[in-house]
Amino acid sequence: MRIALTSDLHAGFTEKTGSIHEIFFNKLNEEDWDILIIAGDLGSTKIAHVKSISKRIQRLINKPVLVVRGNHDLWDKSKYNVRETLKLTEQIFKDNGIHLLSNNPFKLNNLHILGWDGWYQHLYPPTRDEDYIAPYTNGKLTFRFLQEEAERTFQKILDKTKEIRTIDNQKIICVTHMPCFYHPTVYGDHSANQRYINYLEGFCDILCFGHTHVQVDDTQFGIRILNAGSDYDEPAYTIFNIQEDQNEKT
Ligand SMILES: [Fe+2]
Ligand SMILES: [Fe+2]
């Protein structure tokens, strides 16, 4: 099984971004892969950006596309509060045949791909989320709400991985937007939410992430960690193999 990984495409960033993505997806289509993972930040500052890239993906890609939301995919202060933004993006992905991992793990034979939008911790790393995420104040502070969403989804994923680990020969890929480990040289201020680190040992086989826009292929906690290093208007992908079942060579 060959997996293509990208992230941080940031549709709507400049007037050239659309045509850059057109070329990018066409180039990706020339490669040999089975599933595409996009580790968040599909948009820039508006839900309309998430919608436009989702439509482009539906038009150009005819294999499974799995996503998690990045912090920018919650950015839109024009019309919505963040609770509505979460619902709208969910609907956009559904309408365009894109699989939102934080709602449903993806399973193919013995391969499980799980994901969550979490690791929200808006004060650290220092993002501009507070300027761009519209508040949800109906009884809850916006970032408290997001943190609770992240915790809830993470617990769900944690329970699921424990369940999968009781069966032999299962492979787990986890996808998140922000990195969830600390490495000041490589990730600098973008290391996020260290409270999760304790869970990482044996948590999955491969962990895919985005957000830092820096290419990574490393091993920590016995887990291969990958970031395609995609950047604003300089999209990048990486393709990796995972043994899908015990008889298949990688
Ligand atoms: Fe990004
Ligand atoms: Fe990000």
Image (cartoon, rainbow, N blue to C red):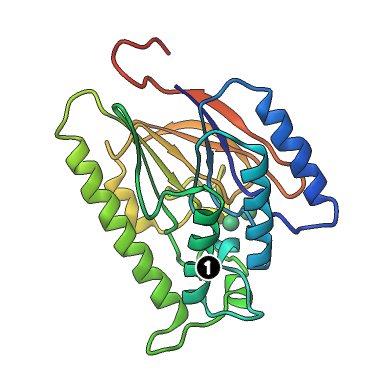
Q: Which residue occupies the foreground of this view, 120 or 13? A: 13
Write the residue at 39% across / 54% down.
Answer: 102
**Cβ(mark 1) to ligand 2 < 8 Å?**
no
* 29 left or right of 121 in image: right
Write the residue at 41% across / 23% down.
Answer: 242
* 134 left or right of 204 in image: right
Q: Is residue 68 above or below residue 172?
A: below
Q: Quadrant of residue 13?
A: bottom right
Write the residue at 17% across / 41% down.
Answer: 163
* 232 left or right of 124 in image: right
Q: Is residue 130 above or below residue 149?
A: below
Identify which amino acid the numbered label 1 is placed on: Leu
Q: Residues within 10 Å of mark 1 (few under 14, many from 20)?
A: some
Quarter of the image containing the C terminus? Answer: top left
As drawn, the residue found furthest toward the left would be 166
Residue 111 screen position, x and y as percent: 33, 30
Q: Quadrant of residue 118?
A: bottom left
* 54 left or right of 116 in image: right
Residue 146 screen position, x and y as percent: 42, 71
Write the residue at 49% across / 55% down.
Answer: 94
Quarter of the image containing the N terminus? Answer: top left
Residue 40 screen position, x and y as percent: 55, 51
Q: Which residue occupies the foreground of this view, 250 or 51? A: 51
Q: Determine the quadrant in which ligand 1 lies.
A: bottom right
Q: Which residue occupies the foreground of this view, 209 or 81? A: 81
As helix, strand or loop, the secondary structure at mark 1 comes to helix
Q: Quadrant of residue 145?
A: bottom left
Q: Name the residue tied to disc 1.
A: 88
